[in-house]
Amino acid sequence: MPRTKVGVIGCGNISGAYLAMGQRFEAVEVVACADMLPERARAKAEEFGLPRACGVEELLATDEIEIVANLTIPHAHAEVALAALEAGKHTYAEKPFAVTRDEGRRVLELAEAKGLLVGCAPDTFLGAGGQTARKILDDGWIGEPIGCSAHMMSHGHESWHPDPEFYYKPGGGPMFDMGPYYLTALVNLLGPVKRLTGSATVTFPQRTITSQPKHGTVIEVEVPTHVNGLLQFANGAVGTIATTFDVWAAQLPDIEIYGTEGTLSVPNPNSFGGSPRVRRAQADGWTDFPQSHLYAEQNRGIGVADMAHALRSGRPHRASGALAFHVLDIMQSIHEAWEQGAWRDLDSTCERPALLPVGLRPGTLDD
Ligand SMILES: NC(=O)c1ccc[n+]([C@@H]2O[C@H](COP(=O)([O-])OP(=O)(O)OC[C@H]3O[C@@H](n4cnc5c(N)ncnc54)[C@H](O)[C@@H]3O)[C@@H](O)[C@H]2O)c1
């Protein structure tokens, strides 16, 4: 299969995880990178041995590039995606898909009008831990799923991220930042959410950066930083999700799925590895399951490679725009439900992405 050529826009903190994707997956090759700060693009191109660093417009005008990987900050995701689509490129964004449902809808509509694919992180659910958990569920080890709980408990990113303001501005906050990992994992396991409500608060209206180089800078917090959702899934399961940047310590599981015949403990959805555990009714203890699937290491970009396979074969891609838009809709609706003190019915929905095949050759995603 010829390699699909990928251009990366946004050469910040996370870009390193993507720029090496061509070494991990046969379907893709990163041929150029761009950033609004040209020196960042130059430095990354040099570090990863890419053929070219260039400006955003030049990258979008490059004929050989078929997929644009959009690794800019959340506020720029929709704008860059729309520009990529206008330039005739398929596009894959870091999470969240967009900052608002309206922006996300515009991206989906333009993609459809142009006959182009849109994808979005997280793609961690395609790792060994997430795929094994999905197989355990689908194979019936815990019976029919009836509920779930998910927890992302932390004290925010200003202690380590070099440029953490965006986490406390619209499009940031714990639900928009980390919710995509947890909600994408839940939708991959249980299917779409149909109804929800939420609660939220801002515990610290100002945060002080303790990382370098902005040590001592005070951030005005503009979004809720402790956000909970109560979810009803279309399949009948009910669950909770808690996300926070306000908590110093907690002892809660990442994700648990409850079934009529047992409980499934799902590994951290922000990682590719981990061993799911199951405790069945009447069992004395938990059983660690061996991984049924590949890709237990850091494999960000697997969603881009999956999109490249989809482009060649015509099959659906897994980390899709429809899935990411549904997750965005859930996140925005949780905030709106909290503001309105109401339950919300969701208009969006999506299919559960197909399980990856078992027994793949490393570097590939299709049989
Ligand atoms: N840092 C992480 O550990 C991490 C992990 C997973 C996902 N993400 C996600 O990845 C995205 C990027 O995060 P980051 O930590 O790399 O941020 P960052 O601020 O370190 O990097 C973003 C880069 O995008 C560039 N940029 C911004 N707007 C642009 C535009 N319109 N055109 C061209 N370049 C533009 C910036 O100059 C910067 O170099 C975010 O959506 C974030 O949620 C980050």
Image (spheres, rainbow, N blue to C red):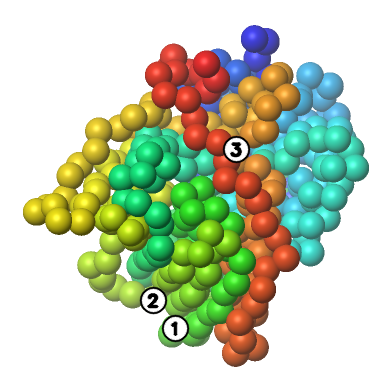
Relative to 201, does residue 252 appear above or below in the rendering? above
Relative to 48, does residue 197 appear above or below in the rendering? below
Q: Which one is nearer the viewer's eye here, 206 or 337?
A: 337
Spot the residue most to the bottom: 341
User: Circle 3 is placed at which residue position?
Assistant: 318
Q: Residue at x 34, y 58 (%)?
A: 259
Residue 279 on image: x %, y %: 21, 52
Q: Secondary structure at mark 1?
A: loop
Mark 3 vs mark 1, foreground winner is: 3
Relative to 165, does residue 79 appear above or below in the rendering? above
Give whichever of discs 3 and 2 has the lower sequence position: 2
Q: Indicate the amino acid at tag 3.
A: Arg
Q: How many residues crowd mark 2 within 10 Å: few (<14), some (14–19), many (20+)?
A: some
Disc 1 from disc 2: Cα separation:
7 Å
Q: Secondary structure at mark 3?
A: loop
Disc 3 from disc 2: Cα separation:
33 Å
Residue 331 on image: x %, y %: 59, 67
Q: How many residues crowd mark 1 within 10 Å: few (<14), some (14–19), many (20+)?
A: few
Mark 1 vs mark 2, foreground winner is: 2
Mark 3 vs mark 2, foreground winner is: 3
Disc 3 from disc 1: Cα separation:
37 Å
Q: Which one is nearer the viewer's eye here, 182 or 289?
A: 289
Q: Secondary structure at mark 2?
A: loop
Q: Quadrant of residue 141?
A: top left
Residue 267 on image: x %, y %: 32, 48
Q: Indicate the amino acid at tag 1.
A: Phe
Q: Residue at x 67, y 33 (%)?
A: 316
Give whichever of discs 1 and 2 has the lower sequence position: 1
Specify the label residue 42 is tagged with.
none
Residue 186 on image: x %, y %: 47, 55
User: Circle 2 is placed at which residue position?
Assistant: 246
Specify the label residue 204 is tagged with.
1
